[in-house]
Amino acid sequence: MRNWPVLDLRLTTPRLELRMPSLDDLDELADRALEGVHAPDRMPFGVPWTDAPAGELGANVIRYQLGVIARWQPEHWCCNFVVVHEGRVVGTQDMSGRDFAVTREVHTGSWLGRAYQGEGLGTEMRAAVLHLAFAGLGALTAVSGAFLDNPASLGVSRKLGYRPNGTMVQQIQGRRGVQQLLLLERENFTAPVPVEIHGLEPCLPHFGLEP
């Protein structure tokens, strides 16, 4: 797309394609949310969006993702990639930056449908956006976080070279939740899989960078 090239940005790994979502992709992503993202007795998200009634959850997912795209500014952007495995949307991996041209820091977040968890896809999709951050955009640091009772997410971070960076306490569903904050420096990251970036150069001004 000539006037909004970000929609053509793609990342590929041996098993995955990460792309900016089409409307059909968002419809499929909403299906994954409705099928389930986590066990009913757990809440891995600081904002408990999966608690919405089934009749509202799918539409909420689509509205949220469209809003992320609509709010994009060079000073505050978020790549909300859908993750495609074997031709099917299986989850979403985002990467955001605020005043990135100066801070050179990104934040990542993600979720996968429960049927696709435990197969290493979470590591592969986070590695893809970290490669975009460090090799494509020139980031210096990446930050993330996960609740202490979310060992799968914390395990992905360990595999990719993050180190603990303090904790944060918050209220979640009326309970005390402790998030482990995490920091990854560029020199400590090596992608565990090959990653290819497609269509980045025309997007650089939208990340606040010189082309």
Image: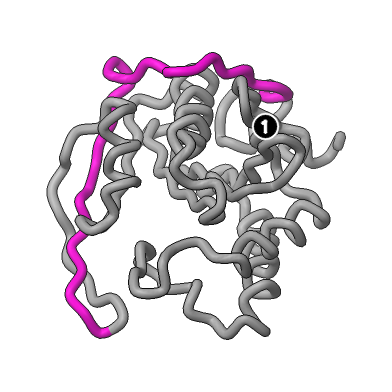
| Tag 1 residue | 17
**Rendered residue at 41%/38% (across/down):** 106
| Relative vertical location of residue 107 with respect to residue 16 in this rendering, above or below | below
Instruction: Specify the quadrant of the image occupied by residue 130.
Output: top left
Which segment did they paint magenta? 174-200
**Rendered residue at 15%/54% (across/down):** 167
Asked whether residue 12 is in view, the answer is: yes
SS at mark 1? strand
For the C terminus, the quadrant is top right
Instruction: Specify the quadrant of the image occupied by residue 140.
Output: top left
Q: Position of residue 17 (x, y in %)?
A: 67, 32
Asked whether residue 204 is in view, the answer is: no
| Relative vertical location of residue 173 with respect to residue 22 in this rendering, above or below | below
**Rendered residue at 31%/81% (across/down):** 173
| Relative vertical location of residue 88 with respect to residue 198 in this rendering, above or below | below
Residue 24 counted in the magenta span: no
Amino acid type of the residue that numbered disc 1 sits on in the rendered structure: Glu
Question: Residue at the right extreme?
Answer: 2
Q: Position of residue 11 (x, y in %)?
A: 64, 27
Q: Position of residue 139 (x, y in %)?
A: 41, 26
Q: Nearer the viewer, residue 39 or 192?
A: 39
- Mark 1 Cα shell of 10 Å, populated few (<14), some (14-19), many (≥20): many
Q: Nearer the viewer, residue 135 or 29?
A: 29
For the N terminus, the quadrant is top right
Question: Residue at the left extreme?
Answer: 166
**Rendered residue at 49%/17% (across/down):** 193
Side of 179 where 32 appears, left or right: right
